[in-house]
Image (cartoon, helix red, strand yellow):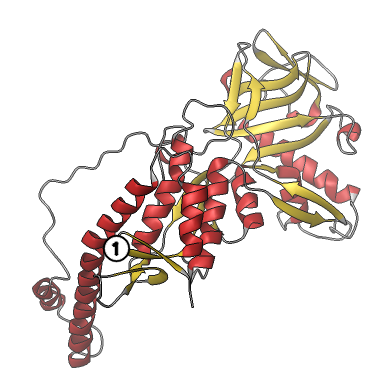
Amino acid sequence: MTARTSVHGLQVATELHRFIEEKVLPGTGVTSAAFWKGFDAIVTELAPKNIALLAERDHLQSEMDAWHKANPGPIRDMKAYRAFLEKIGYLVPVPAHVTATATNVDDELALQAGPQLVVPILNARYALNAANARWGSLYDALYGTDVIPETEGIEKGKGYNPARGAKVIAYARNVLDQAAPLASGSHKDAALYSVAGGKLVVKPTSGAATGLADPSLFVGYQGAAEAPSSVLLRHNGIHLDIRIDRGTAIGKEDAAGISDVVVEAALSTIMDLEDSVAVVDAADKVLAYSNWLGILQGTLTEEVQKGGKTFTRGLNPDREYTSPAGGKLSLHGRSLMFVRNVGHLMTNPAILYGPEGGTLKEIPEGILDAVVTTAIAIHDLKRKDQPGIKNSRNVSVFFV
């Protein structure tokens, strides 16, 4: 029997009620009384509408089932079929004038197309991995996948294969030549990267120093200008970070000391409460909401065991660089997070509602998720001008 706390017209699983009271609301500026009163009002107004819409959906489906049983086979008279769909209300007239506007939309949606991940929010490790997948090692990706074929002599094997590594490095240099070509020569021949006068200077193994064919593609660096530890390039809005470290096994064998090329990958990630998880009760909801809260507060961590070692994984910080002009450049260290709430077909026993003395019903799960995930997102919205880990830089919440 689920323990429940009665608040306004809602019967809330005590586990969920305690989580909202103790973890979600503090720091949002929303009082307990205002939250539960508003939640109850939303359920009172929208739950019956949700039920009515689902009933209409069932009605439309039954009408369509009956039509197709009476008219089996390929549809031959499309005009008649369209007239039928209009008659039952499945198709409605196109509105005469429609405009859509958006404000405070982050660049990852408004300006820059890029890969998007979907991750089950119940698994904290997966969620952290996805959030941190904004930046990834091109060397690792090439070495570990079939982009580099495992032909004779360049198989992955159990240990590091230098022959395969050479193929990886050559491939990565080709990527650099395509994304940010030099004015003369190739990144393959680089022996030293440096910054002078706000421009990238590349000294080859032989011959005169050169720069980028398009100097504007150089956008930042880390370390000393004369010997940077990182060179940041931007191609079509996507960043490539040349990592330089002669102290690593790869870097010490490289003429320019390049140890890796790190590229922007997953620009956004959907934290999924629906398709990739089974969240069936209050305990599941608390786990899912806890991970969403930890992501937006920047506090989510997970103990990970790998290679016989245990370490704590958390959210990556933003990446800080020196701009070509000498100022500070900060880039988002994580994917932009969306949350996918459960659709309106489902109900969940985490909260029951209904008239006093009447039959209690499970709350429509889409309403439950919308209220709680939005309340959690206030933690991110209120950090607009604070340093540290933030999700939306334009003070928005993104739903799927």
Residue 273 can be seen in this image: no
Of the pair 103 and 95, the residue shown nearer to us:
103
Residue lying furthest top in this view? 197
Residue 9 visible, this orientation: yes
Examine the image and state in which quarter residue 241 appears: top right
Badge 1 element? loop
In-image side of 287 versus 129 (left or right): left
For this rendering, which residue is in front, 275 or 231? 275
- Crowdedness of circle 1 by 10 Å Cα count: few (<14), some, many (20+)? some
Instruction: Classify residue 110 by image quadrant.
Output: top left
- Residue 397 lies left or right of residue 171; in this view the side is left
Left or right, 326 with reference to 83: right
Mark 1: which amino acid?
Gly
- Write the residue at 77% across / 37% down: 260
At a point 12% along the width and 53% down the height, the residue shown is: 95
Q: Quadrant of the C terminus?
A: bottom left
Residue 180 in picture, x, y percent from top left = 63, 29
Q: Position of residue 325 (x, y in %)?
A: 60, 11
- Number of marks drawn: 1
Residue identified by numbered label 1: 9
Above or below, 163 relative to 152: above
379 w.r.t. 357: above or below: above
User: What residue appears at the point 27 percent right and 70 percent down from the top-left corner?
Assistant: 354
| Viewer-side residue, 135 vs 188 | 135
Above/below status of 298 relative to 4: above
Percent x, y of residue 396: 40, 38
| Residue occupying the point 21% across, 76% down | 55
Residue 17 in picture, x, y percent from top left: 45, 58
